[in-house]
Image (cartoon, helix red, strand yellow):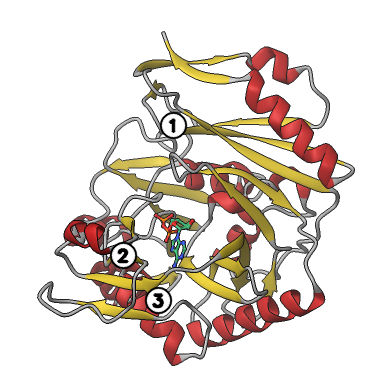
C-alpha cells in the first residue's frame, strides 16, 4: 500500500521505523530538505500548508495521514472527495487545528474542559475572571502561543488575535492518554501517562507510565475517552492531554490528532507502541494490545541553551552502558536551543526506581554543538 504522510519529522520517522517490518511504501512531504524522514521514505520537499502541493502529493496514494496538524485541511477534504482515504479525516483535523473550534467541540459533546470565551475580534470584552490563560486560535505549538494573564497589570499583554481565554486550572498533575479508533470502529486506549514539564521551556521533560490514580479519577478519564471516541466520527490516533486538578476533577486541556511526544515510552514500555497502533489505524487492521509491561519513562533530548550548529550528544556512550535504557535519535544534524533532537526511554520495576534512573540519565547527557 502507498501510505503518504504530511510532515517528515520524528513522529513520521518513528512510525515508518516501526512499520517497515510490514510491506508498505511510505511517502513523506516536508518543507525541510533534511527532515528526519528524508532518507527513510520517498521524500517530497514542499509545504504541507499549500493546497496544490498537498493535493499533488496525496492524489496517487492509497491513504494519506499526518504527523503534524498544521496542514492544509481543505486539500485533505478535496482528497477525500477524490476517493483517497484520509486518516484522521479532514473534518476532525479542521476542528482540532483551531483552538476555538476544538473547545466548542468539547462543549458540544459534554467533554469537561476549562470554561472559556472565544475571542474572534480583539475588541470584545473579556468576561473570564483573572487570572486566566490565553491561547492563540491557530499556530500554537510546544507551549508557544499560550500565556498566563495573572493580574490587571498583565492585561496589557493580552494578544490581539483570535484566541481562547480559558479558566486557570489549579493543576495537581498533567496526564495524557493516547486513544485509537480504526475505520471498522474498534477502539483502544493506552494506559494513562504523567507528564512532568520543564517550567522554563514548557517542553515535555519526563513522561512516565503507568500512573497510579484513584478509581474515581480513572473513571472520569474513561468517560472522557469514550465520549471523545464516539464524537470524532473518524479513524485516527489521538493524544488527549488532561489536567487533574487539586480537587480530583479531570479536564481536557487539548487534543492532538496524531502521534504524540507523551507516547514515546510505549516503544519499550508497552506491549505495543503508539507507532504500531498508528500503523494499524492507517491500514484499518485489528488494533494492538497496549498494556504497560513494566514502569517506563521518557526524557526528551533537547538542544541546550547557547549551542547552535552540528550536534554532539555529550555523555551518550555512558548512557549506553546502562541497562534497560534506550536511545532514540531523530536524524537531525543541527541543534539549536530547545529543539527536540531525540529521546531516551528507561524501564524500571517501580516508580521510585524509574524517577531515579531518569534523573540520572538526564544529568549524564547534554545536547551541544561542535
Ligand atoms: P501547547 O499545545 O503549546 O503545549 P498547552 O495548551 O498544552 O500548549 O499549554 C501549555 C501548558 O500551559 C500546559 O502544559 C499547562 O502547564 C499550561 N496550561 C495550559 N492551559 C492551562 C489552564 N487552563 N490552566 C492552567 N495551566 C494551563
Residue underneath mark 1: 39
Q: Secondary structure at mark 2?
A: strand
Residue for point 81% across, 76% down: 215
On screen, residue 196 versus residue 116, left or right, reads right
**Disc 1 vs disc 3: Cβ atoms closer than 8 Å?**
no
Badge nearest the viewer, 1 or 3: 3
Q: In the image, residue 340 lies at what x, y percent?
A: 46, 35
In the rendered image, the quadrant that contains the C terminus is top left
Residue underneath mark 2: 134
Is residue 91 among what the camera can see? Answer: no
First in residue order: circle 2 vs circle 3? 3
Is residue 351 positioned above or below 64 on the image? above
Q: What is the residue that sits farthest to the top in this orientation?
A: 370
Residue underneath mark 3: 92
Q: Quadrant of residue 50?
A: bottom left
Residue 145 is labelled as none
Amino acid at each position: 500500500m502507498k501510505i503518504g504522510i504530511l510532515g517528515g519529522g520524528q513522529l513520521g520517522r518513528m512510525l515508518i521505523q516501526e512499520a517497515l517490518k510490514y510491506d508498505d511504501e511510505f511517502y513523506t512531504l516536508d518543507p525541510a530538505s533534511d527532515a528526519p524522514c528524508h532518507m527513510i521514505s520517498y521524500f517530497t520537499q514542499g509545504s504541507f500548508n499549500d493546497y496544490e502541493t498537498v493535493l499533488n502529493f496525496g492524489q496517487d496514494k492509497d491513504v494519506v495521514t499526518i504527523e503534524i496538524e498544521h496542514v492544509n485541511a481543505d486539500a485533505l477534504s478535496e482528497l477525500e472527495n477524490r476517493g483517497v482515504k484520509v486518516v484522521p479525516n479532514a473534518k476532525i483535523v479542521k476542528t482540532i487545528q483551531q483552538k476555538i473550534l476544538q473547545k466548542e467541540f468539547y462543549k458540544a459533546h459534554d467533554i469537561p474542559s476549562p470554561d472559556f470565551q472565544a475571542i474572534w475580534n480583539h475588541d470584545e470584552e473579556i468576561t473570564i475572571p483573572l487570572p486566566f490563560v490565553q491561547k492563540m486560535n491557530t499556530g500554537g505549538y510546544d507551549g508557544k502561543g499560550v500565556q498566563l494573564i495573572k493580574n490587571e497589570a498583565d492585561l496589557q499583554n493580552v494578544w490581539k488575535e483570535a484566541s481562547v481565554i480559558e479558566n486557570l486550572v489549579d493543576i495537581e498533575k498533567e496526564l495524557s492518554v493516547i486513544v485509537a479508533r480504526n475505520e471498522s470502529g474498534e477502539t483502544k486506549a493506552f494506559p494513562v501517562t504523567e507528564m512532568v514539564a520543564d517550567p522554563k521551556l514548557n517542553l515535555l521533560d519526563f513522561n512516565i507510565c503507568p500512573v497510579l490514580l484513584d478509581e474515581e479519577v480513572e473513571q472520569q478519564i474513561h468517560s472522557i475517552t469514550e465520549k471523545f471516541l464516539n464524537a470524532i466520527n473518524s479513524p485516527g490516533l489521538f493524544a488527549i492531554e488532561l489536567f487533574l486538578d487539586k480537587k480530583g476533577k479531570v479536564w481536557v486541556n487539548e487534543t492532538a490528532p496524531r502521534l504524540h511526544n507523551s507516547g514515546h515510552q510505549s516503544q519499550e514500555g508497552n506491549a505495543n507502541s503508539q507507532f504500531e497502533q498508528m500503523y494499524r489505524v492507517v491500514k484499518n487492521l485489528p488494533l494492538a494490545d497496549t498494556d504497560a509491561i513494566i514502569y517506563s519513562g521518557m526524557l526528551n533530548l533537547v538542544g541546550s541553551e547557547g549551542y547552535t550548529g552540528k550536534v554532539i550528544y555529550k555523555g551518550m556512550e555512558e548512557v549506553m552502558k546502562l541497562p534497560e535504557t534506550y536511545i532514540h535519535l531523530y536524524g537531525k544534524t543541527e541543534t539549536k536551543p530547545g529543539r527536540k533532537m531525540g529521546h531516551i526511554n528507561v524501564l524500571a520495576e517501580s516508580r521510585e526506581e524509574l524517577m531515579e534512573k531518569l534523573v540520572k540519565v538526564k544529568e549524564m547527557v547534554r545536547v551541544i554543538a561542535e
